[in-house]
Image: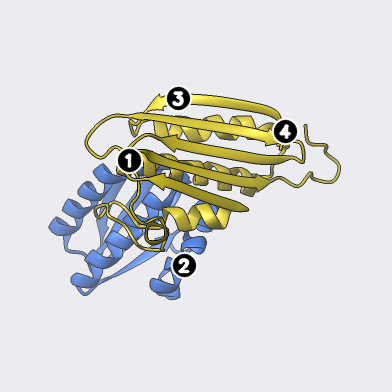
Chain colours: A yellow, B blue
């Protein structure tokens, strides 16, 4: 799908960047004129994907996270969060609700939230190479206001 | 991420303010844990009215408090959940885990 507009962002896996990353995508997505719920869903999904990269991809080091957001011709937002960290051995297991290898400050609900707030999510991972999370959400133009 | 604690008639009121994400959750859980340990309350009331954003880290905070209060034979209540945070709670299904009556009565102050 040809994209109409896009941004690309690279930042180190420091937790202070979680807030920056989700705000950035929310600002970019604003041109699709999402409603408050949609905007909240996008921010939450980005926060989950970026947090996963920070916590799981680089558990003992600081690595690079690449965040891309695109708007496709049909008004669909496509977000990619990619790391070159340690990867996930069993993606299906990692995506199960309540499953976590994190501590008591993690709920194991990150992928469940991404799946329920976005239209589609695809996770590709290679142990030792990294993980790439792609998420899509179509913003339906509101009556009375034109998107883009 | 800020949190304030107030013990009132056996209930520990925990008021949360700001953005509740992974960046703030770890410190919050350790603060919360030491407050519960020293107060040993019968009930914990988690007030989310000051929360401007919450992701699944907020669920971890709720689940942790729920578990800790169960160990103490107490209960938790979640009040004033803003829309965005409520969507996260609903999507997770933890509202079925934590009894519905513990989430109701959000008018009580």
Q: Mark 1 near mark 2, Cβ–Cβ under 8 Å?
A: no
Nearer the camera: disc 2 or disc 4: 4
Secondary structure beneath label 3: strand
Name the subunit of mark 3.
Answer: A
Please report the residue visible at 40 percent of the width from the left and 55 percent of the height from the top: A91
User: Distance of mark 1 from mark 2, alpha carbons?
Assistant: 26 Å
- What is the x, y in percent for residue B64? 28, 60
Name the subunit of mark 4.
Answer: A
Please report the residue visible at 62 percent of the width from the left and 46 percent of the height from the top: A136
User: Distance of mark 1 from mark 3, alpha carbons?
Assistant: 15 Å
Tell me if mark 3 has few (under 14), some (14-19) or many (20+) residues whose alpha carbon lies within 10 angstroms of its own: some
Looking at the rendered structure, whether the residues under marks 4 and 1 are on a common chain is answered as yes
Name the subunit of mark 2.
Answer: B
Mark toward the start of the polypeptide (4 vs 1): 4
State the residue position of label 2.
B93
Looking at the rendered structure, whether the residues under marks 2 and 3 are on a common chain is answered as no
Looking at the rendered structure, whether the residues under marks 2 and 4 are on a common chain is answered as no
Looking at the rendered structure, whether the residues under marks 1 and 2 are on a common chain is answered as no
State the residue position of label 3.
A10
Please report the residue visible at 74 percent of the width from the left and 40 percent of the height from the top: A75
State the residue position of label 4.
A2
Nearest the viewer among B11 and A71 is: A71
């Amino acid at each position: 799908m040809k994209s109409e507009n896009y941004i690309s962002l690279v930042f180190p896996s420091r937790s202070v960047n979680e807030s920056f990353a989700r705000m950035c995508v929310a600002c970019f997505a604003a041109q699709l004129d999402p409603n408050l719920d949609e905007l909240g869903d996008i921010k939450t999904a980005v926060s989950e994907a970026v947090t996963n990269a920070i916590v799981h991809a680089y558990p003992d080091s600081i690595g690079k996270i690449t965040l891309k957001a695109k708007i496709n011709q049909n008004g669909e937002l496509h977000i990619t969060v990619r790391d070159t960290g340690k990867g996930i051995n069993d993606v299906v297991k990692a995506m199960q609700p309540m499953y976590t290898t994190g501590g008591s400050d993690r709920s194991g609900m990150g992928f469940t939230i991404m799946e329920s707030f976005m239209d589609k999510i695809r996770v590709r991972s290679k142990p030792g190479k990294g993980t790439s999370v792609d998420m899509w959400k179509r913003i339906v133009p509101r009556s009375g206001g034109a998107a883009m | 991420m800020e949190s304030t604690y107030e013990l009132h008639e056996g209930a520990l009121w925990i008021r949360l303010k700001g953005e509740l994400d992974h960046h703030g959750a770890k410190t919050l859980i350790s603060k919360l844990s030491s407050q519960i340990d020293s107060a040993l309350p019968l009930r914990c009331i988690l007030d989310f009215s000051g929360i401007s954003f919450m992701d699944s880290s907020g669920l971890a905070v709720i689940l942790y408090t729920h578990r800790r209060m169960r160990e103490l034979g107490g209960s938790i209540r979640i009040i004033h959940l803003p829309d965005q945070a409520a969507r996260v709670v609903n999507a997770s299904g933890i509202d079925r885990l934590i009894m519905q009556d513990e989430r109701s009565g959000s008018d009580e102050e």
